[in-house]
Image: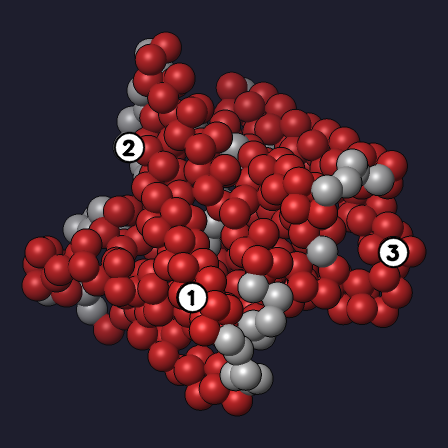
Amino acid sequence: MAGAQSTTNSFNTSVPGMASGLMAGVAAGAMWGLVFIAPRLAPDFAPVQLSAGRYLAYGIVAAILVAPSWRRLTARLTGREWWALLWLSFLGNILYYVFLANAVQRGGVAMTSLVIGLLPVAVTLAGSRHAGAAPLRRLLPSVALSVAGLACVAWQSLSAGGMGSMTGLLCAVGALVSWTAYAVQNSRWLARLHSVSAGDWSLLTGVVTGAEALLLVPASLAAPMAHTAQQWCVFIGLVASVAVLCSVAGNALWNHASRVLPLALTGQMIVFETLFAMLYGYLWEQRWPATLECVALALLLAGVVSCARVHRGHGAA
């Protein structure tokens, strides 16, 4: 998810346009859901190593794609934009993924994906003072449903794994907070930028993220490095795949959905990231969801639907 952008272009309200936007949103969720299973595929590597590897690969791919227009783009950026890119890249990519990888390895895929499922409501609440936002009092039912869902996740997490899962839960909440802050700040910068497209901003974010990932290399070297050649091959293939599928392809699909779907509908498409992440997690763990996980998922989805209805009604009014 990190690095996703939205645009302010006019929406394509035709049936084919809406269908392509919906399919792109679902496909983006399928791509982003892979992020949650990646730490389980390389359990011998520390989260800081996974984060450094993923974003170094992302930076390389983004640099290749943005190279033809690099001079044109950089000529349009001031020092403020570069500082914004540095902060947003750290908040929405580096910090977010370190939290997420820790949460997955300590608390499991299902728990982490359920907590991240609060993103649509969290982003809405964080932006509740923006123009066009629904009154906070009308969002209380969706907030209550989401909090109840999070409480179920916490109870299930503590019952299943004790303090190790508690640490994972706190890391998942950290990932939720960091990406929510990123989404709000990033939307503000996109509203200010008129000479740089959302796609170019995404690629520039990728390049800066890759540069910041270099700072993680010393910490990565301090982590245990006694891995076999086969483990290193799996690690390299994994981080490269996540960079291409989740960061590049996932963001491109999300940009397309953002161009053709109304914002109230686009924001709720984030739910598909949670659904696919949970599906991948249950397939990996070869189990059915527990009762509390089913209840938590129902509550979180109900909270998102409630939030979407409030905003659709508010927009119509």
Instruction: Tell me the CA gap for discs 3 and 1.
Output: 33 Å
* Percent x, y of residue 118: 66, 45
Q: Residue furthest top?
A: 15
Q: How many marks?
A: 3
Above/below status of 117 relative to 256: below
Q: Is residue 283 left or right of residue 93?
A: right
Quadrant of residue 162 within the rendered picture: bottom right
What's the amino acid at mark 1? Answer: Cys
Quadrant of residue 87 within the rendered picture: bottom left
Q: Residue 160 — which label?
A: 3
What's the amino acid at mark 2? Answer: Asn
Instruction: Tell me the CA gap for discs 2 and 3.
Output: 46 Å
Q: Is residue 133 left or right of residue 52?
A: right
Above/below status of 56 relative to 242: below
* Percent x, y of residue 102: 64, 67
Q: In this orientation, which residue lies closer to the viewer: 125 or 120? A: 120
What's the amino acid at mark 3? Answer: Ala
Could you tell me if residue 33 is visible in this image? yes
Please tell me which residue is depicted at 58% across the width and 52% down the height of the picture: 37
Q: Which residue bears the numbered disc 2?
A: 9
Q: Earlier in the sequence, mark 2 or mark 3?
A: 2
Q: Which residue bears the numbered disc 1?
A: 233
Q: Earlier in the sequence, mark 2 or mark 1?
A: 2
Q: Residue furthest right?
A: 159
- Secondary structure beneath disc 2? loop
Instruction: Tell me the CA gap for discs 2 and 1.
Output: 42 Å
**Mark 3 closeness class: few <14, some 14–19, many ≥20 residues within 10 Å:** few
Q: In this orientation, which residue lies closer to the viewer: 270 or 287? A: 287
Comparing labels 2 and 3, the label whose residue is closer to the camera:
3
Task: Name the quarter where the C terminus is drawn.
Answer: top right
Q: Earlier in the sequence, mark 3 or mark 1?
A: 3
